[in-house]
Amino acid sequence: VSDYAVVGVTGVAANNLSEINGQVDSQSLTTVAAFQTLTDSVNVIQSYAADNTQPVPSVSDYADFGVTGVDANNLAEINAQVDSQSLTNVASIQTLIDSLTVIQNYAVDNTQTAPTVTDYAQVGINGVDANNLSEVNGQVDSQSLTTVAAIQTLINSVNVIQSYAADNTQTAPSATDYVVVGVTGIDANNLSEVNGQVGSQSLTTVAAIQIL
């Protein structure tokens, strides 16, 4: 810390020294101006991770910090997860961005790499497992879902339906649950019958439920 202070760099402290040193090394930074730019961006990101009333990190803040893949299209989602997961180091933020990019790319083009259970977990989404991954990916693609909130809503409804299909003492799916997972034609008049058959036939896929 004192070395940076001596050369005129402000804002370096015990809690950010390791990250700053890591980036000085990996980015081969050799000027005071570059050290200061890095330090300022590190502090913006780490302050926001601890308290989202602080200034919001920009695309350039992440670039200065050595994180790649942040742009105007994913900045809001990244900032939301940096805040909610309290991510303060390059490695964890890069992991987040890489997984978010996989999911968003697949949402717009299903010839791209399919997201894994780990990808969803890395971006802060709960409830994805080997049993529902295929259905979740199918709807992320067909509905072009690119935000954590929309995908979490999807997964919650997928899990309600699949849990009920396995055990009809669980919470019964609502018409909204079916709409969220991409099933059309459900309304108050047929919901009870649909649920009855989902339960008795153990239907767990959108395709099977749509045929019903």
Image: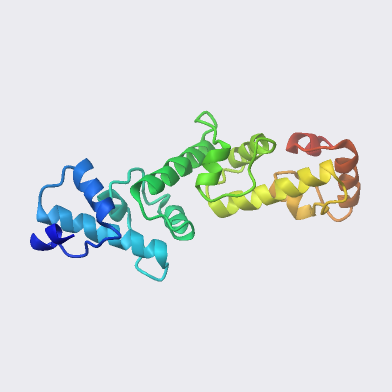
Residue 197 or 20: which is nearer the viewer?
20
Quadrant in which the C terminus is drawn: top right
Residue 125 or 90: which is nearer the viewer?
90
Q: Residue at x 77, y 38 (%)?
A: 204
Q: Position of residue 77 (x, y in %)?
A: 46, 54
Q: Position of residue 120 (x, y in %)?
A: 55, 43
Quadrant in which the N terminus is drawn: bottom left
Image vertical order of residue 73 relative to residue 113, above or below: below
Q: Is residue 178 left or right of residue 94?
A: right
Q: Is residue 82 left or right of residue 115?
A: left
Q: Is residue 196 left or right of residue 7?
A: right
Q: Position of residue 95 (x, y in %)?
A: 42, 43
Q: Residue at x 64, y 47 (%)?
A: 127
Q: Residue at x 54, y 51 (%)?
A: 148
Residue 7 or 152: which is nearer the viewer?
7
Image vertical order of residue 143 relative to residue 10, above or below: above
Q: How is the image coloured?
A: rainbow
Residue 198 or 40: which is nearer the viewer?
40
User: Which residue is the extreme one toward the bottom?
Assistant: 53
Q: Position of residue 79 (x, y in %)?
A: 42, 57
Q: Quadrant of residue 132?
A: top right
Image vertical order of residue 79 relative to residue 98, above or below: below
Please tell me how many numbered marks the rendered image carries.
0
Q: Is residue 188 left or right of residue 152?
A: right
